[in-house]
Image: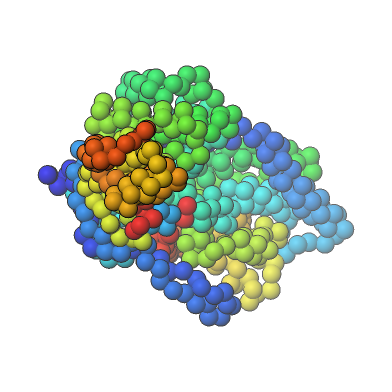
Amino acid sequence: MEIDQAIELQSLYKNYRVKTSVSLFKPSFKDIAAIRGISFIHDTRQNLGVFGKNGAGKTTLIKMLTGILHPSSGFINVMGYTPYNLKPEFKSKIALFQGGKQNLVWDIPAIQSLELSRYIFGYSKQDFNHRLSSFAEALDLGDELNQPPRNMSLGQRSKMELIYSFIHLPKVVFLDEPTSGLDIITRSKFRDFINFCHTEYGICFVITSHNIKDITDCCKSCIVLEQGQIIYQGDKDFLLEKHQHEIITLRADSDCAAIEISNLYGGKVNGTQVTIESLGSNSNALICKIVSQYLIKDFKVAKKDDEEIIAEILNNA
Amino acid sequence: MRNYYVALGIQTIKEAMAYRLNFILSFLVVIIPLAGQLLLSKYIYSMGYQIGSWQLNQLLAYYLIATIASEFFSIGTWWDIGNDIKNGGLSSHLVKPYSYYWHNFSVYYTLRVVSISFALMVAYIAYVVISGSLIPHIQANSILQFLILALITAPLSFLITYSLSILAFFFTDIGFIMKLLGILLPFASGNILPLDIFPTPIRVVLVKLPSAYLVYHPSCIMSGVYNWNEFVQLVGEALLWLLLFLFIVRWLWSKGRRSYEAIG
């Protein structure tokens, strides 16, 4: 992997100084560790998702990767640049979108604010028009472009902000809670749009979100953060598969048989019904084994969805 | 990038036009105190008294220029910058390849030019009605000196405003600075009374403070008070303040950036 395609962190720490008592003469402070010695390398040809509970350090990580925050210590390199030096060349190659934050001017038509991007990043009017029509089509936007943001719904405004944040086509876009507060349809539209931009323009997205589907639908790689430390880094499918549980619910012909099955294979009994959690995807083999030993009247297998799996990983972390 | 600052200025004008009521109110803010100062001066002189060594015509011209100068070269904490730092809005500027300083300079002076162009008309009308003179008592030399000094005081006033505003990096609330300035500045800048009428110890200090270079000295220049030698000395002193505040802004920014917590 070339250095200009990599995001690399080594033993990165970030502490915040927090006031713990208010005093006119001598307030007291304490340091809180938001990021505690994390290291990873990511290839920017792939999208990266960051899972984590509130306060796990996701946003702090994004702010250090974009150069907004100085790390307390450690090494950080994004595409060959040290982010916090905030070199203009670096800033031209990245973009940041924070869900719920407003950057467009509230009272003038959105298209006029969007056009400022052309002057900031220095590309032609023709490119601007081409990209805008392509983005607007992908996000189902039309006349809204000529309205001031104050007259738009939250979903429309968020779409405009999303366009504004990376219509200059940077190499890496950092999305911090991009779908926060949006309805299910708009969230889905956002995800389609992210995938469209990744495929069409080769943009790498680094996404933090509490809407798990934002990451599972758009990213192949992921990291899981817990209390400022990485507890998993790697392939997202592998993580989900590893923690996948299939839940087998079956009905035996008698209470005794149900208890026996429960004792033998582990599970919960409720009358003749037994519920067994099967790690991974080996339910078929297990059901075949049970059916060969007992008379089973009915059974069903349900998989946990991605959100349940991630919630379980974070809860058990 | 220069194109960006121009485009931003144009956008700022469009945005300002969305708040038309502000213009009407800004007329009142300019005209009421100015009319008060002009009427009071006329009354004092009509009673046979004099303010310092000022002739009435000179003083009326002084107040007209002081009003315009204090509008254009005003200093204080700028809410936009303080709010950006306090609430994390600065983050979205930091990741864009333009200078946050010049970005704000463009917005700040565009708004000043827009508001001053309206205020100028209103202030001039007030002056003509009250003084009874169509042309203020101003010489061509004075206009040239004023324009030269304005090249220093315009960036100086913004540098002072910027340095006060980025104190938000270090204080939770910088509203107190604005309150303090609101009380001290009209006196210290010479907006209410020409500084030379204060008792000597106070005057000596006040005329050397940066605030005097924003209102008092430009207004004195337009009233034809300074000869060229005095003017050159004035420009030298204003340049020293400019350099000092350049250094202060750079130092505060680099310190503040490291402590910025990007809330939100």
Give the percent coordinates (x, y) of residue B36. 79, 51
Q: Is residue A304 left or right of residue B175?
A: left
Q: Position of residue B176 (x, y in %)?
A: 62, 64
Q: Nearer the viewer, residue A168 or B110?
A: A168
Give the tally of numbered discs: 0
- Quarter of the image holding residue B55? bottom right
Residue found 47% across the figure and 74% down from its top: A29
The residue closer to the viewer here, A177 or A16, is A177
Residue in view at x 35 percent, y 57 percent:
A316
- Residue A75 to residue A189: above or below: below
**Residue at the extreme right:** B47
Residue at image coords 27%, 47%: A279
- From this viewpoint, is residue A223 visible? yes
Colour style of the rendered protein structure: rainbow
**On screen, B156 above or below B141?**
below
Quadrant, the N terminus of chain B? top left
Is B74 in front, or is B35?
Answer: B74
Question: Where residue A128 sits in the image (x, y, percent)?
Answer: 35, 24
Q: Residue at x 69, y 73 (%)?
A: B199
A116 vs A9, left or right, is right
- Measured as percent of width and height from the top left, residue A246 is found at 31, 41
Residue A180 appears left or right of B220: left
Q: Residue furthest bottom?
A: A25
User: Does any portion of residue A112 appear in the rendered image?
Assistant: no
Q: Is residue A1 above or below residue A133?
A: below
